[in-house]
Amino acid sequence: MSKQLKEYRILFEKLDSEHKPNNVEEDNLGLRSKLGGKPGWIQDSKSPLCPHCNKQMTFVMQLDSIEHQATNNPHSINALSDEQEYMFGDVGMIYTFFCFECSEVQSIFQGY
């Protein structure tokens, strides 16, 4: 049986088209989770093709390592403790894509 992670609630804020994307600079580590827009890739772009229809999948969301230890991160947890559950690799990110034609979902992980 897999481990059940502690629950966080996310407050969504709609952004206008003038908003600059939350990029992957070091001062944003742990704070880059979002829905929509363009992925803030840590490494090279790896947007997947749907395995059924072979069309480009739509970026839905990215989930950052939200418990990254940083003074500006409200969810910061000491990196030396056993309490960090949302640390993906070395402050990595999980990206999720969806095919609106086939209802296929794919996720990609990137880390430093």
Image: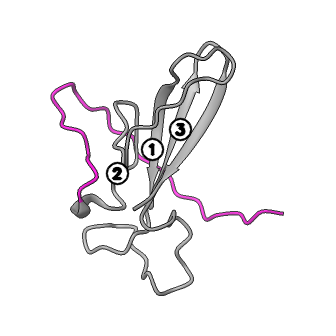
**Amino acid at pointer 3:** Thr
Q: Is residue 70 above or below residue 102?
A: below
**Spatial separation of the CA atoms under disc 2 and disc 3:** 14 Å
**Residue 21 x/y as whole percent:** 24, 39
Asked whether 17 falls inside the magenta stretch, the response is yes
* Rendered residue at 52%/50% (across/down): 109
**Residue 80 x/y as whole percent:** 47, 87
Q: Which mark is residue 62?
A: 1
Q: Mark 1 falls on what kind of element?
A: strand
* Rendered residue at 66%/25% (across/down): 104
Residue at the bottom extreme? 80
Q: Is residue 34 above or below residue 25?
A: above
- Compare residues 22 and 47 and report the one nearer the observer: 47
- Compare residues 91 and 83 and report the one nearer the observer: 91
Disc 2 vs disc 1: Cβ atoms closer than 8 Å? yes
Q: Is residue 32 above or below residue 97?
A: below
Residue at the right extreme? 1
**Residue 88 x/y as whole percent:** 51, 62
Q: Which residues are magenta?
A: 1-25
